[in-house]
């Protein structure tokens, strides 16, 4: 008599296959889902004899599920634009800790909680390596990743300044701020009432001009003009004296008396400002507290291929009063082709001391040459202009956004323009992924069959990379699953038909007694 257990085993096995296929179809849109495939194997056999050749005569007694294998092939990557979404390209799983249980997942639809924890949809804390002062050490202990709200980037004092600019080779020689003597009725022929002395300094050298009674003011002007460092002349009722070399004129003595004003001694008014032969540009630097200070770089042409420079800071910034404080001055020399030849190296260690806001003293370098030793300053025919400025200081900033790169590093973007690593997501691989135990909620558990997790940074030791702002879709294919559904249904139907056939045979055997 036929055994009903044989088709019953087929019904049971195909029923399980239908369950696997329907589960795959149910998870067509599940993020990071890995489909399953049912594998059958036959059961034991009954030997009912041998044939004439001695070969065994065996009758099988059915089938059973041999394995339900996971299909861990790569799913499609879909860009979402959500900064916390991650898709794993290649091998590996996100490592999670959920209520003390370590789990693993390919589902990268992550989010950030109110306390900054990076978690999966079911609340598992994503594991990785936290950054310390912008440095991530993968050798440190694995821990839960947090992206704290209000995270700040500390300020950084300026250490390097670079200006890319051109000084017009056609610029006339610089003239200092003019010093003026005012009076009534001054003219070149004005007769001086008495002898006297006119003395002034250019900051380095002193110059003295002595006259006698009866000389004219024109005699004084001619004497001054005989010195190539100065020009003198009248502008209305004012005697104007300029320093050609770009150094300010300061009068120390004036005992000249103008006969036209009844012997009154003339006085010198405040200097006016002249920009002839000069060019100025500015750049903001940051002190150790992050405060900004505007430095002015002023250039004054002193010869055909030579310019004096001075770097100043507002006096109030360094607790002083009056004119800007000079931090550094010197001379720039250019070749006949307009290339900087002196200084031959960057200007190092320019100090700023005594900040009014209490910041530590600052020392910065003025980069005159690029990494290829080409000068950043030129003197060619064309308008004096600054094409770019660069400095490496910045104020403090707060976290405004973040991105996740291919290495799994969460790069924080701060309001001060800095991008600083916050943490790095870890990936786990296994010797036998088929041995992983599915735990629901898109998660897996390691088992003795899978082996222990090998956890480390992405793109190392065979681990895949991480695509930020993307998700890995389910790898269940609807066409494949529908085909398998038909096969499972037909298998179930065939075994059901075998049972009805066995039933009919059994009924016929019973009817033999009638």
Image (cartoon, helix red, strand yellow):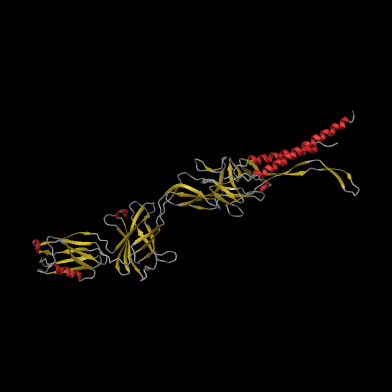
The answer to whether residue 267 is above or below residue 121 is: below
Place of residue 395 in the rendered image (x, y in percent of width and height, measured from the top left): 40, 51
On the question of residue 13 being in view, the answer is no
Place of residue 70 in the rendered image (x, y in percent of width and height, measured from the top left): 67, 46
- The answer to which image quadrant residue 473 occupies is top right
Image quadrant where one finds the C terminus: top right
The answer to whether residue 99 is above or below residue 383 is: above
Place of residue 233 in the rendered image (x, y in percent of width and height, measured from the top left): 18, 65
- The answer to which image quadrant residue 215 occupies is bottom left
- The answer to which image quadrant residue 195 occupies is bottom left
Q: Residue furthest top?
A: 514
On the question of residue 251 being in view, the answer is yes
For the point 17% across and 70% down, the residue is 222
For the point 59% across and 52% down, the residue is 464
Of the pair 104 and 491, the residue shown nearer to us: 491
Q: Count the marks: how many? A: 0
Left or right of residue 136, residue 271 in this image: left
Image quadrant where one finds the N terminus: top right
Of the pair 418 and 487, the residue shown nearer to us: 487
Q: Residue furthest right?
A: 52
Of the pair 328 and 441, the residue shown nearer to us: 441
Place of residue 230 in the rendered image (x, y in percent of width and height, measured from the top left): 22, 68
Q: Residue furthest left?
A: 262
């Amino acid at each position: 008599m036929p055994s009903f257990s044989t088709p019953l085993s087929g019904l049971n096995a195909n029923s399980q296959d239908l369950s696997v296929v329907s589960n795959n179809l149910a998870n067509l849109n599940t993020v990071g889902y890995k489909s399953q495939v049912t594998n059958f194997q036959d059961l034991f056999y009954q030997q009912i004899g041998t044939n004439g050749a001695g070969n065994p005569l065996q009758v099988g007694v059915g089938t059973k599920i041999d394995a339900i294998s996971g299909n861990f092939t790569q799913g499609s990557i879909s860009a979402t634009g959500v900064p916390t979404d991650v898709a794993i390209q290649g091998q590996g799983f996100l490592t999670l800790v959920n209520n003390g249980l370590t789990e693993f997942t390919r589902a990268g639809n992550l989010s950030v909680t109110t306390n900054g924890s990076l978690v999966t949809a079911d609340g598992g804390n994503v594991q990785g390596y936290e950054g310390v002062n912008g440095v991530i050490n993968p050798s440190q202990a694995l821990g839960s990743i947090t992206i704290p709200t209000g995270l700040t980037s500390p300020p950084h004092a300026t250490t390097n300044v670079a200006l890319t600019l051109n000084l017009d080779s056609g610029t006339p020689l610089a003239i200092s701020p003019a010093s003026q003597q005012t009076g009534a009725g001054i003219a070149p022929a004005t007769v001086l009432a008495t002898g006297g002395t006119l003395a002034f300094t250019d900051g380095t050298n002193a110059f003295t001009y002595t006259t006698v009674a009866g000389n004219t003011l024109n005699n004084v002007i001619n004497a001054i003009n005989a010195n190539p460092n100065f020009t003198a002349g009248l502008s209305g009722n004012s005697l104007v004296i300029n320093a050609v070399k770009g150094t300010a004129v300061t009068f120390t003595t004036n005992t000249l008396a103008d006969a036209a004003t009844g012997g009154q001694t003339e006085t010198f008014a405040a200097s006016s400002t002249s920009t002839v032969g000069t060019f100025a540009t500015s750049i903001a630097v940051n002190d150790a507290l992050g405060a900004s200070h505007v430095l002015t770089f002023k250039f004054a042409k002193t010869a055909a291929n030579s310019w004096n420079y001075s770097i100043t800071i507002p006096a109030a910034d360094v607790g002083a009063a009056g004119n800007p404080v000079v931090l550094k001055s010197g001379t720039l020399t250019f070749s006949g082709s307009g290339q900087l030849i002196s200084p031959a190296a960057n200007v190092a260690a320019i100090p700023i001391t005594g900040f009014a806001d209490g910041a530590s003293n600052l020392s910065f370098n003025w980069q005159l040459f690029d990494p290829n030793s080409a000068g950043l300053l030129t003197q060619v025919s064309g308008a004096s202009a600054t094409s770019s400025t660069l400095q490496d200081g910045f104020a403090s900033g707060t976290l405004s956004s973040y991105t996740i790169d291919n290495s799994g590093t969460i790069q924080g973007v701060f309001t001060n323009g800095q991008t600083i690593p916050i943490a790095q997501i870890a990936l786990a691989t296994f010797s036998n992924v088929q041995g992983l135990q599915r735990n629901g909620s898109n998660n897996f558990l390691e088992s003795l069959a899978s082996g222990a997790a090998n956890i480390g940074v992405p793109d190392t030791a065979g681990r895949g990379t991480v695509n930020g702002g993307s998700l890995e879709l389910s790898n269940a294919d609807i066409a494949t699953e529908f085909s398998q559904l038909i096969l499972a249904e037909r298998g179930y139907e065939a075994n059901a038909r075998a049972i009805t056939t066995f039933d009919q045979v059994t009924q016929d055997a019973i009817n033999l007694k009638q």
